[in-house]
Structures are given as C-alpha cells and as structure tokens.
Amino acid sequence: MRVFLDTNVWLSASIFAGLCEALVTECSDNGWLLTSPLVQAEAHAVLLRKFPHLPRASALFDDNWREAELIADVAEPAEDNDARLVAAAVAAGAHIFVTGDRRVLGWKAVGAMRILSPREAWIALFAPHLRGG
C-alpha cells in the first residue's frame, strides 16, 4: 500500500493528538507513507505563520516526515499546490491520497488513486470490518 498524506493531515498529526497522528504512525510503521518536498515547505510555512508558539511541532513534523518515502514534486499547475500534490502522488503510484481539503475530497479519485478523508482512510486501511463488507 502506498499512502500520500496532504499537508493538512501532516500538520494535524504534528499539532493535535488524535486520528491524523494515529494515521501517520500506523502508515509509517507499515512503510506505506509517501511525501514530497512541497509538503515539507508548505508545512514549515504554516507552522511558522500560524503556530510560532509551538516550536516543538516543527521538530515533530520533521521527525515524522523523514520516515516517509520522498517522491518528486510535480511543477504544474504552478498556481495550484493541491493539484501538484495529487499529481505527484499519482505519478509515484499512490493508492490513497488523504486530505481534509473539501475541494480535493470532491475529486474522489484520480485514475486508480482514491482521495479520502483521514477517517475514510483509517477505515479503509485499518478497520475493514467497519466498511460494511
């Protein structure tokens, strides 16, 4: 399984205890995590801008981020980082793209890659008995 987490999922995992933190931990422990330099750049910018009072969050993000397989960024469309991250995940053969972004969730899938919320991803990956099947 190859799972790409959007920046917002990484940030939530780094700042708050809960589902996103568990998702990062479990995917990392299974060797499924993918990431890109753009995720790191976006995360650091948001942490500096919105959470300067939590310097430990940046270190925690970096420690977790380094555990993921680094994939190449995609340059286009230059004005849409969400589309760039999705395209990079597809190019790297990700099976699931996890995001909390409603616009991106609306895409549902790109090719064979499913786009899921953190809760949907958790159920799909770790709680198959809850899928109803």
Image (cartoon, rainbow, N blue to C red):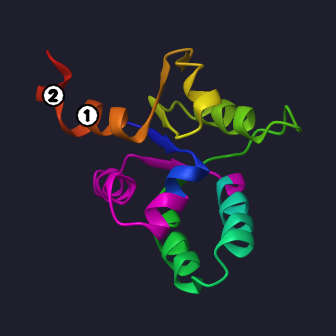
The span picked out in magenta is: 11-38
**Furthest-right residue in this view:** 79
Does any portion of residue 67 appear in the rendered image? no
Please say whether residue 26 is one of the residues in the magenta stretch. yes
Rounded to the nearest whole Å, what is the CA distance between mark 2 and mark 1?
A: 6 Å
Graded by Cα atoms within 10 Å as few (under 14), some (14 to 19) or many (20 or more), the crowding at tag 1 reads some
Numbered tag placed on residue 31 in the rendering: none
Give the vertical position of 20 relative to 106 (above or below): below
For label 2, the residue is 130
Q: Label 1's element?
A: helix
Q: Main secondary structure of the magenta part?
A: helix
Classify residue 86 by image quadrant.
Answer: top right
Residue at image point 35% right, 32% down: 120
As drawn, is 77 to the left or to the right of 43? Answer: right
Residue 2: give x, y in percent of width and height: 42, 38
Q: Residue drawn 32% across and 59% down?
A: 18
Task: For mark 2, give the secondary structure.
Answer: helix
Image position, residue 28 (x, y; %): 36, 56
Q: Position of residue 94 (x, y in %)?
A: 50, 32
Residue 27 in the image: state x and y as whole percent.
34, 50
Q: Quadrant of the C terminus?
A: top left
- Which residue, given by chain and number where applicable, does mark 1 sit on? 123
* Residue at 49% across, 59% down: 12
On the picture, is 101 further left or further right than 98?
right
Which of the 4 quarters of the picture holds residue 84? Answer: top right
- Examine the rendered structure and indicate whether residue 67 appears above or below residue 81: below
